[in-house]
């Protein structure tokens, strides 16, 4: 994907934030610690294959990079599922022993109503947007995993 900016729902993504791309998908660092289609069912067969093959490749590299032992892949498909950006995307979460007391708590956290989750994790108070420089540095580190 050679482009001036990538589209992520209504947002423009600087190419320096993208660390891997195919003709149909791309991987980017997150503003707060992909294909232009609103819902998973709207993807073509080719886009679905590319998205999951890309997620598999990126997941394996990120698991090693973060010295994790497992991965959680999540898609929130539609507003009632917690999708906040109207754009199909996969979150890839490297997992380590003990990151949750009970492993399945990650799903409980994903399912909690948005307001309760924000309150519990203090997302609005504690989580800050990262600078473009911070995101570019992380993308550059990840980009080197695919050379």
Image (cartoon, rainbow, N blue to C red):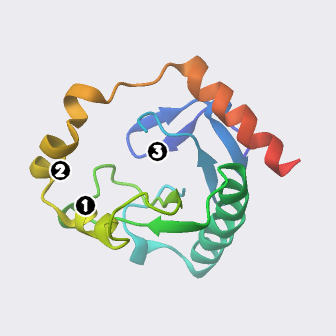
Distance CA(mark 2)–CA(mark 3): 23 Å
Which mark identifies residue 11? none
Give the mark nearer the N terminus: 2 vs 1.
Answer: 1
Say which of 38 and 81 sits in front.
Answer: 81
Quarter of the image where one finds residue 121:
top left
Callout 1: helix, strand or loop?
A: helix
The residue beneath circle 1 is 109
Contact, mark 2 vs mark 3 (Cβ under 8 Å): no
The residue beneath circle 3 is 8
Contact, mark 2 vs mark 1 (Cβ under 8 Å): yes
Picture residue at 72% right of the left edge, 57% below the top: 64
Callout 3: helix, strand or loop?
A: strand
Q: Nearer the viewer, mark 2 or mark 3?
A: 2
Which mark identifies residue 117? 2
Callout 2: helix, strand or loop?
A: helix
Say which of 62 and 67 sits in front.
Answer: 67
Left or right of 127 in this view: 28: right
Say which of 67 and 17 sits in front.
Answer: 67
Residue sticking out furthest to the right: 147
Left or right of 61 in this view: 147: right
Residue 127 visible, this angle: yes
């Amino acid at each position: 994907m050679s482009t001036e900016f990538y589209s992520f729902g209504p947002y423009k993504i600087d190419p320096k934030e993208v660390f891997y791309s195919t003709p149909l998908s791309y991987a980017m660092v997150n503003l707060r610690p992909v294909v232009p289609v609103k819902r998973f069912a709207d993807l073509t067969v080719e886009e679905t294959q590319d998205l999951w093959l890309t997620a598999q490749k990126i997941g394996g590299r990120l698991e090693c990079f973060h010295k994790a032992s497992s991965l959680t892949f999540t898609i929130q498909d539609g507003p009632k599922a917690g999708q906040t950006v109207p754009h199909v995307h996969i979150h890839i979460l490297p997992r380590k022993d003990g990151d949750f007391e009970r492993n399945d708590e990650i799903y409980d956290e994903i399912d909690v109503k948005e307001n309760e989750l924000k309150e519990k994790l203090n997302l609005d108070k504690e989580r800050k947007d990262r600078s473009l420089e911070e995101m570019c540095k992380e993308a550059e580190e990840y980009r080197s995993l695919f050379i």
